[in-house]
Amino acid sequence: MVRPSPYSGWGNQNPRWNQNSAQGAQQAQQPRKPSPLEEAFNQFVKIIQTNFENMQTTAVNQGASIKNLETRIR
């Protein structure tokens, strides 16, 4: 009988490369400290996101105010 290659076709449900990657994923990795540039960028993104959310709220409030004024004028 011919033994099928572990790297041939879709029939092999347990390829060797998958076994190796699963073993590597089980090893605990130490979290690394972000660089000063990464920290600055993350802070920048947080500030920009907060500013964007504030602008969205302001736009919604202004739209409601305009609609209220239009209703009063009619």
Image (tube, grey):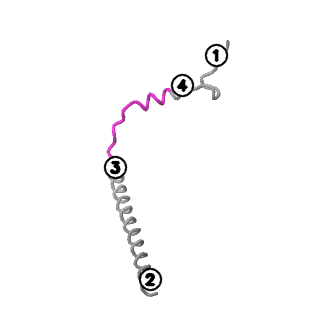
Quarter of the view holding residue 46: bottom left
Residue 71: assigned label? 2
Q: Is residue 13 above or below residue 40?
A: above
Dot placed on the residue nearer the N-terminal end, 3 or 2: 3
Spatial distance from mark 4 to mark 1, Cα to Cα? 15 Å
Q: Is residue 55 magenta?
A: no
Q: Can you identify the residue that label 1 sits on?
A: 3
Q: Are the residues at dot 3 and dot 4 in contact (C-beta closer than 8 Å)?
A: no
**Amino acid residing under circle 3:** Ser
First of labels 3, 4 by sequence position: 4
Residue at 39%, 30% in the rendered image: 27
Q: Are marks 3 and 1 in contact (CB under 8 Å)?
A: no
Q: Nearer the viewer, mark 3 or mark 1?
A: 1
Q: CA distance from mark 3 to mark 2?
A: 54 Å
Q: Give the alpha-carbon distance from disc 3 to disc 4, as whole Å.
A: 36 Å
Give the magenta part as a residue range: 19-34
Secondary structure of the residue carrying tag 3 is loop
Which dot marks residue 16?
4
User: Residue 34: x percent and y percent?
Assistant: 34, 48
Residue at 57% from the left image edge and 26% from the top image edge: 13
Q: Which residue is mark 3?
A: 35
